[in-house]
Amino acid sequence: MVLITGGAGFIGSNLIHYWTSTTTETVINVDNLTYAGNLQNLAELAGDPRYIFFRSDIGNIQAICQILRKYRPRAIVNLAAESHVDRSIHDPDAFIQTNVVGTLRLLKAVYSHWSALGASEQDEFRFLHVSTDEVYGSLEPGAPPFRETTAYAPNSPYAASKAASDHLVRSYHRTYGLPVLITNCCNNYGPYQFPEKLIPLIIHRALAGKPLPIYGDGGNVRDWLYVADHCAALQRVLERGRPGEVYNIGASSEKTNLEVVHRLCDILDEGKPRRDGKSYREQVAFVKDRPGHDRRYGIDATKIQRELGWKPQETFESGLRKTTRWYIDNQQWVADVTSSAYRDWIALHYGERAG
Ligand code: NAD
Ligand code: TYD
């Protein structure tokens, strides 16, 4: 049995689907259902005895201890977090509360449970902390991509809070011997991603006939990984990763934002042409840049490839086509998650009402 925190979010719900379809294990999902958590993502699993859901904050030590005592999972995968950079710029407090304080309190609960286990259960137990490449800061053009040994230099409140959580997790290994693993992954995309992040936001707004906001000059670079490939990597790290180690996960698929948006427009032009026959590229609108906007991220995934034998299955093109198709086919899901809270965010951030 494994316990996944943040399982109602984007990567978490993909990971739960991945786990239940590739193993026979039971999965426990602990999520407090913020605006980003959506149980509809897991509707297919309702009533499945291999899936158990608890609505709880990761910072609720008593609740987490009770769940751990009752179910004795062999591993925890910690995905619960506030995850959107722009929101962290507007209001960092929730990021500190969940990503830093919440992770510390989760570690306390897990450590108290783990220290009471027998020796062999202790040896086999794993705490996998899922983090981001943003902790490493911004790369200069032409600089080598991030390695596990790259110094941390977080620039946004989001990245700083994730960096702090990584350090806390590491300290629980070095100080108390908890068998932890840390992964730092590049930007994910795929089904069930909340349409505040670039790729689903662009698809949603393109189909709604709205401007496609590109921050600054659109030359910022991200390394993009299809979410199912991230899920496979997390499973592999849990199976074969060495406690105390860090693994960078990435696809070596660096693209500028403008390249991403143009490619999305072209795929939509083919799959869901505009009524007036013009290209969705006509909707592109350059807007004010994000403060502190990191210019470039890139991951060197040599370690996980060599040591654990993982590599991505999707190319950027195949992943983007699958993702676009999913959003075209699941417009009801998008309509459901773009609730009043979503509209408030769009109004605050982009200065307009969302439709
Ligand atoms: P998300 O925002 O879609 O989902 C986060 C989930 O965590 C939601 O279901 C939310 O309800 C839950 N949550 C938030 N605060 C909680 C709390 N205090 N207690 C319990 N549950 C809580 O995020 P995501 O994109 O799926 O990211 C998941 C993890 O992966 C995060 O830790 C993020 O930093 C990391 N990550 C994301 C990406 C990416 O591109 N999305 C890349 C690398 C790493
Ligand atoms: P985002 O999906 O927010 O992920 P992150 O900031 O964690 O990398 O943004 C991806 C890139 O797209 C980033 O360089 C910011 C840019 N971006 C836009 O240009 N316009 C937008 O409306 C959004 C949300 C992001």
Image (cartoon, rainbow, N blue to C red):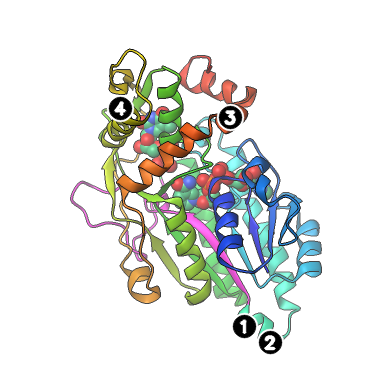
The numbered mark at residue 3 is: none
Graded by Cα atoms within 10 Å as few (under 14), some (14 to 19) or many (20 or more), the crowding at tag 2 reads: few
Q: Is mark 1 within 8 Å of ligand 1?
A: no
Q: What is the magenta range?
A: 125-154
Q: Secondary structure at mark 3?
A: helix
Name the residue carrying label 4: 216
Q: Secondary structure at mark 1?
A: helix
Foreground mark, 3 or 4, reads 3
Q: Nearer the viewer, residue 281 or 250?
A: 281
Q: Quadrant of residue 35?
A: top right
Disc 2 versus disc 3: distance between alpha carbons? 49 Å
Q: Position of residue 147 (x, y in %)?
A: 32, 63
Name the residue carrying label 1: 123
Q: Position of residue 226 (x, y in %)?
A: 41, 50
Q: Secondary structure at mark 4?
A: loop
Q: Quadrant of residue 343?
A: top right
Name the residue carrying label 3: 332
**Disc nearer the start of the sequence (3/1):** 1
**Disc nearer the start of the sequence (1/4):** 1
Relative to residue 102, is residue 167 drawn left or right?
Answer: left
